[in-house]
Image (cartoon, rainbow, N blue to C red):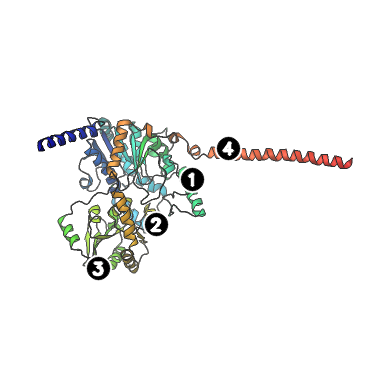
């Protein structure tokens, strides 16, 4: 009996495996990840890349030879394709010079020229495309698909799949729906450039609509078109290039942190791409977390933390000295020297396994700069937040966090020690924060597939079936047709003409009536 059951189970497993893998090609595809050379952006791509590698695909990551600690950044199962800096006019985005300039901008010490900033941000794309040895290797590998960073400030990585005539998949947190020809309604979907929710007043809806129109006509990225002119001179803008190149848009947020919006078949949402169940912590951290009977506060501002001025760091330390919780403070990697005096409950560490720390049951609060990945990791593990947005979309991210009831936001330049202490107690004392984010956490964890597996599924879908069936005719429409401006103009002209004709007819009829009445009176 047991023998028969074992045979039946084995037969069932074999049949299941055949069903699962029957549609998959015998040999995997060859996929290149091309992203902005910033750790958080490269990690997003690699999370999808690892899921694809587990499915048997060969995955490569384009990475600058001088990228700091590149061995630590590179995920298992992903091979590096190195390019070398060919143009040193501007420093790379991850360089110390760029970090200093960014912090000066955050602190209000400089007001950087927009064109300089954009040239600054696209330096790594320039280096990649101008490295002939790198491009020769890419051509020789004959990639089936390129997963590229669609960051709105510099979507220059789209030039690579276009130049190689390879299908491209955009990975982005900053999708402006109209660019992907998604019929977003500005009356209910706020742009990420504003601090608006989906319940706007008349003036907010008016401003939101105006921003949508202006941002769609005057694209920020189109100020920097040198690569476009060199490698795709027949294309007019970066937005047009992406519409030609991208067969799929993978968007790394959804309504649990943003607000509901319509979706087309070629737009796939995979929020929380860096989230995962808790892994085992290093022994030192594990012992520290388990000993924290009053709870643990995690503070991390990503790679910017080491750039914070000493006076701001000291304000954080003064506030933490007034709470009973253990504080793990990511600190290092910048010019700011470690403070001479650190409270006993505070531990300064140069690197944190952020997702695993947030998932520990003793973690009670996350103090963050409101990066998209960190916010979703906090949401996934049900940890309330205090946000200190620094630049870019982080101000919008802080606003959405507050609106959804997941935490409070503060100003990094003006906050006081007392304000921070009060807000820490507020998040602990008001249970609504924990209840709201725990509910969102339960919703995320109830989904049938992880964000990584969802993204990998749809990339495989495109590899096997192509992406033409996902495209809509709107992708080939100019903006004025997509927004029906020509139809609205036609209706307005028709209404004006009809009104004019009606007015003319009435005037003629009235004149005739008056003439008849006058004639009758004269008789």
Label 3 close to label 2 by CB (< 8 Å)? no
* On screen, residue 42 above or below 200: above
Label 4 secondary element:
helix
- State which tag comes first along the sequence, 3 or 1: 1
Mark whose residue sits in front, 1 or 4? 4
Residue 77 location, x and y as percent?
Answer: 20, 40
Residue 371 location, x and y as percent?
Answer: 33, 52
Neighbourhood count class around disc 3 (C-alpha, 10 Å): few under 14, some 14–19, many 20 upward = few
Neighbourhood count class around disc 1 (C-alpha, 10 Å): few under 14, some 14–19, many 20 upward = some
* On screen, residue 375 above or below 458: below
- State which tag comes first along the sequence, 3 or 2: 3
Mark whose residue sits in front, 3 or 2? 2
Residue depicted at x 71% and y 39%: 504
Instruction: Read off the residue under disc 2.
Output: 403
Q: CA distance from mark 3 to mark 1?
A: 50 Å
Label 3 secondary element:
loop
Instruction: Read off the residue under disc 4.
Output: 490
């Amino acid at each position: 009996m047991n023998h028969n059951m074992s045979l039946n189970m084995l037969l069932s497993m074999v049949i299941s495996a055949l069903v699962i893998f029957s549609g998959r090609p015998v040999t995997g595809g060859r996929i290149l990840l091309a992203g902005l050379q910033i750790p958080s952006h490269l990690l997003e791509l690699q999370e999808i890349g690892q899921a694809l590698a587990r499915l048997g695909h060969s995955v490569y990551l384009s990475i600058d030879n001088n990228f700091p600690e590149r061995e630590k950044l590179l995920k298992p199962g992903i091979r590096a394709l190195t390019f070398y800096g060919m143009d040193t006019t501007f420093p790379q985005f991850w360089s110390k010079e760029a970090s200093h300039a960014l912090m000066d901008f955050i602190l209000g010490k400089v007001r950087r020229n927009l064109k300089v900033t954009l040239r600054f941000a696209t330096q790594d794309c320039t280096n990649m495309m101008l490295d002939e040895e790198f491009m020769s290797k890419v051509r020789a590998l004959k990639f089936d698909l390129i997963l590229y960073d669609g960051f709105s400030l510099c979507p220059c990585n789209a030039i690579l799949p276009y130049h190689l005539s390879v299908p491209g998949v955009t990975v982005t947190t900053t999708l402006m729906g109209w660019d992907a020809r998604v019929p977003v309604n500005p009356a209910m979907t706020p742009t990420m450039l504003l601090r608006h929710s989906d319940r706007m007043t008349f003036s907010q809806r008016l401003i939101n609509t105006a921003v949508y129109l202006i941002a769609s006509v005057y694209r920020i990225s189109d100020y920097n078109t040198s690569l476009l002119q060199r490698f795709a001179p027949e294309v007019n803008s970066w937005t047009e290039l992406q519409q030609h190149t991208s067969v799929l848009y993978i968007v790394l947020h959804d309504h649990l942190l943003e607000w509901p919006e319509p979706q087309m078949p070629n737009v796939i949402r995979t929020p929380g791409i860096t989230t995962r169940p808790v892994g085992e912590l290093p022994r030192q951290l594990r012992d520290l977390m388990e000993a924290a009977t009053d709870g643990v506060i995690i503070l991390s501002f990503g790679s910017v933390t080491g750039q914070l001025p000493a006076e701001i760091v000291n304000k954080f330390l003064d506030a933490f000295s007034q709470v009973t919780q253990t504080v793990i403070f990511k600190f290092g990697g910048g010019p700011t020297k470690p403070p001479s005096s650190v409270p006993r409950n505070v531990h300064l560490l140069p690197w944190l396994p952020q997702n695993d720390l947030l998932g520990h049951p003793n973690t009670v609060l996350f103090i963050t700069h409101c990066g998209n990945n960190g916010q979703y990791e906090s949401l996934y593990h049900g940890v309330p937040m205090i946000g200190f947005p620094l630049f870019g979309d982080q101000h919008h991210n802080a606003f959405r966090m507050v609106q959804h009831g997941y935490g409070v936001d503060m100003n990094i330049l003006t906050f006081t020690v007392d304000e921070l202490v009060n807000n820490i107690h507020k998040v602990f004392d008001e249970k609504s924060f924990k209840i709201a984010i725990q509910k969102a956490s339960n919703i995320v964890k109830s989904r049938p597939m992880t964000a990584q597996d969802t993204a990998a599924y749809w990339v495989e879908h495109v590899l096997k079936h192509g992406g033409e069936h996902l495209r809509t005719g709107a992708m080939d429409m100019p903006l004025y047709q997509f927004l029906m401006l020509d139809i609205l103009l036609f209706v307005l002209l028709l209404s004006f003409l009809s009104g004019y004709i009606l007015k003319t007819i009435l005037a003629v009829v009235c004149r005739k009536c008056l003439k008849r009445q006058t004639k009758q009176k004269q008789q």
